[in-house]
Amino acid sequence: MADSSFDIVSKVDWQEVDNAINQTSREIATRFDFKNVGGEVKRSGEKIEMKANGEERVKAILDVLKDKFIKRGLSLKALDAAEPQLSGKEYKIFADIKEGITQDDAKKVAKIIRDEGPKGVKAQVQGDELRVSSKSRDDLQTIQALLKGKDLEFAIQFVNYR
């Protein structure tokens, strides 16, 4: 019998990110506490820029964006927001969207699988993803449960289960 396997990836659904940003913009435009603060949210590439005329207001915009991320099923671990910066008369927050697993993070996950997972499970790094294989499908499900229980500093998804 051939080995069963799955891939561990860290991907972001960009359509859902755009939807969250659009919902945030609409909420900023209609909420009373955002009147006359010059609040704005926009995405360019893998960066999200939020701006308002006060530091508390721009942090509130970030909170609204985080709420929209959660409602749309996006992980907050993919959103890497910086501290508010004064730019002229406005405060800005730049947030990066993190996608892909770095080599160091992939090695950490592989070490967790080796140390705490069932014997006979192999993990190998393939670019920005990690392939996990085993003869037993039960072992693979055990690995998925193990990794879901860990508090990793990046979002993970399990794909290509076969």
Image (cartoon, rainbow, N blue to C red):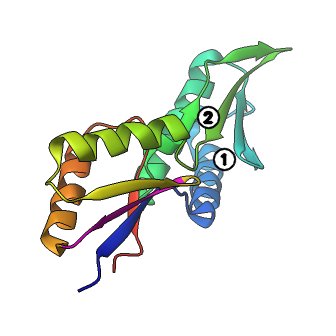
Contact (Cβ within 8 Å) of mark 2 with mark 1 = yes
Three-letter code, disc 2: Phe
Q: Decide which of 7, 76 is in the foreground and name it.
A: 7
Q: Is residue 9 above or below residue 95?
A: below
> Which residue does the image show at 71% across and 41% down from the upper left?
47
Q: Quadrant of the N terminus?
A: bottom left
> Which residue does the image show at 71% across and 27% down from the upper left?
52
Q: Is residue 77 magenta?
A: no
Secondary structure mainly formed by the magenta segment? strand
Q: Which type of secondary structure does the marked residue at label 2 adopt? A: helix
Residue 34 circle label: 2
**Image coords of residue 13 (percent x, y):** 56, 63
Three-letter code, disc 1: Ala
Q: Earlier in the sequence, mark 2 or mark 1?
A: 1
**Image coords of residue 36 (percent x, y):** 72, 31
> Which residue does the image show at 64% across and 34% down from the upper left?
95
Relative to 108, is 100 on the left or the right? right
Q: Is residue 82 above or below residue 5?
A: above
Quarter of the figure with residue 116: top left
Residue 136 circle label: none
Q: Is residue 130 magenta?
A: yes
Cα–Cα gap, marks 2 and 1? 7 Å
> Which residue does the image show at 74% across and 46% down from the upper left?
42
Q: What residue span does the magenta drawing correspond to?
A: 129-135
Q: Which residue lies under the disc numbered 1?
A: 29
List the single residue furthest toward the right: 88
Relative to 81, is 91 on the left or the right? right
Q: Is residue 84 visible?
A: yes
Q: Which type of secondary structure does the marked residue at label 1 adopt? A: helix
Q: Residues within 10 Å of mark 1 (few under 14, many from 20)?
A: some
Q: Residues within 10 Å of mark 2 (few under 14, many from 20)?
A: some
